[in-house]
Amino acid sequence: MTAQPAPPSAGTRLREWVLRDTTGGLLLIVAAVLGLAWANSPWREVYQGLSSTVVGPAALHLDLSLAKWAADGLLAIFFFTVGLELKHEFVAGSLRSLRLAAVPMIAAVGGMVVPAAVFVSIVLAMGDRGAVGGWAIPTATDIAFAVAVLAIFGRGLPKALRLFLLTLAVVDDLLAITVIAVFYTESIDVLWLAVSLAAVAAFGVAVRTKPAPWWALIPIALVAWTAMHASGVHATVAGVLMGFTVPALVVFGERHPRTEHYVEKVAPWSNGIALPIFAFFSAGVTVVGADAGAILGQPVVVAIVCALVLGKLIGVMGTTALVTKLTPLRLPDAIGVRDLLPVGLLTGIGFTVSLLIADLSFATGSAESAGARLAVLIGTAIAATLAAVALRLSARRQRTTDENEDGIPDVNTAPITGDEQATD
C-alpha cells in the first residue's frame, strides 16, 4: 500500500489561509471596523489613550506612539513584501516584458495623475488652498483589499484580469513609494541616510549568500530601518529597498527564486498582523462628541471621495482607451474594454497607502487629518461596493473569443475561483 501523505499542520493551514486573496481584505475590513467602532464608542478615550501611548528609546528618537509604530514600523514589513513583489515582477514576472506590461503600467500612471488633479481642483474650487498638500492621498491602490474584492465577486472571470489588476497595482505602489520618498520628506540627515543605505547594501550581500542567515538579516534590517527613520525619509522606504536586493532568479540550484521564498515567509506576518494593526489604528476617527458636520463638510473629504471613486475610474479607463485607440498597444490576452469599469473601480480602493499618506499630509489630531482618514474609508467603501456590483454583472455576460481585439483568439481564459494565494 502507498503511504498516505501526512495532513498539513495547523500552522501550515493557518499560513495558507492568511495568504489567500480573500483573507487579506477580510482582515483589513474587520480591523478597520473595530478601530472605527471603538473610537466612537463610550470607551473611545481608552482607544485614544492606547493609540497615543508612547514606547521606545528616546535616545534613538524612537519614542513613538503605538499608532506611529504601526505606521512606521509594522508597515515597513508590508513594504518589504511590496519590494519583493516589485523585484520579482520586473525580473521574472509580468513587468519583464514592456510590450505585455505597457498598458497596465500606463493605466497606473493615469490612475494616479487624474485623481490628484481631481483632488486639487476640488479643494481649490472650495477655497481650501491649505489642503492642497494632500494631493497624493487618493492616488494609491490597496493591493490586498482590491484583489480580495476581485476574488470574492469576480469568480468566473478570467484569471488574466487578476494579473492585469496586480500589474497595475504594483506599478501604482512603486509610484506611491516614490511620492512618499520625494514629496513627504521635509529634511534629510545625510549621515543617517548613508548609514541606512550601507545597511541595505549589507542586507543585499547577506541575502545572496548560501544559505542566507536569518539571524544576520534581521539585525541588519533593523539597523537599516532605524537609520532611515532617523534620516527623515519615511522608514517604510527601507523595507522597499531591502526587498529590491533579494534575488528574483534561482540561485545555488534552489527550486524557487528567493523573492518567492521570502514573500511566502513574510506575507503571513504582513497580511495577518502588520496591515490589520495599522488599519485598526488609522481607521479610528472619532466623530461622536465632535462636530461631525464640520469634519464631513471639509473640502478635503469631498475631494478625496470624488478622487478615489471618479478620479481613479476616469484615469484608468480614459488612459487605457486612449492608448489602445491611438497606439498599436492592446490590452492583455482575454481582457476587454468591458473589464476596465470594474478594474477602474477596484483601483479606487485606496485604504492602506492612502491612510499612510493622509497621516503624512496633515498634522496628527487636526480636523484635516480626521477628515482625510474618514474620507479614505468612505471612498474605499463606495469604490469597493460599486466594483463588486460591476464584477458580478460582468461575470454574467457572455465573453467573446477575442476580448482584447488583437486578432488572436484568447487563451488565458482560466476562471478566477476565489482560492488564489498572494504568492501566485
Image: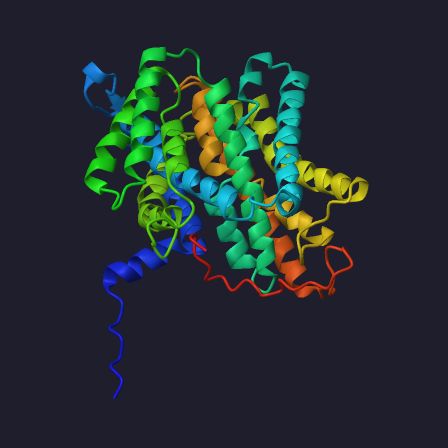
Q: In the rendered image, which quarter is residue 6 located in?
A: bottom left
Label tally: 0
Q: In the rendered image, which quarter is residue 228 located in?
A: top left
Q: From the viewer's side, name the closer residue of 318 and 327.
A: 327
Q: Residue at image x 21%, y 36%?
A: 216
Residue 215 visible here: yes
Q: Is residue 190 left or right of residue 142?
A: left
Q: Residue furthest front?
A: 252
Residue 279 visible here: no
x and y, in percent, of residue 321 in the image: 75, 42
Task: Give the colour scheme of this rendering.
Answer: rainbow
Q: Residue at image x 20%, y 23%?
A: 56
Q: From the viewer's side, name the closer residue of 384 and 342.
A: 342
Q: Is residue 8 left or right of residue 153?
A: left
x and y, in percent, of residue 235 in the image: 36, 25
Q: From the viewer's side, name the closer residue of 275 and 307.
A: 275
x and y, in percent, of residue 153 in the image: 55, 58
Q: Residue furthest right?
A: 326
Q: Is residue 160 left or right of residue 92?
A: right
x and y, in percent, of residue 49 in the image: 26, 27
Q: Residue at image x 28%, y 23%?
A: 226
Q: Residue at image x 46%, y 46%?
A: 144
| Placement of the N terminus among the 4 image quadrants | bottom left
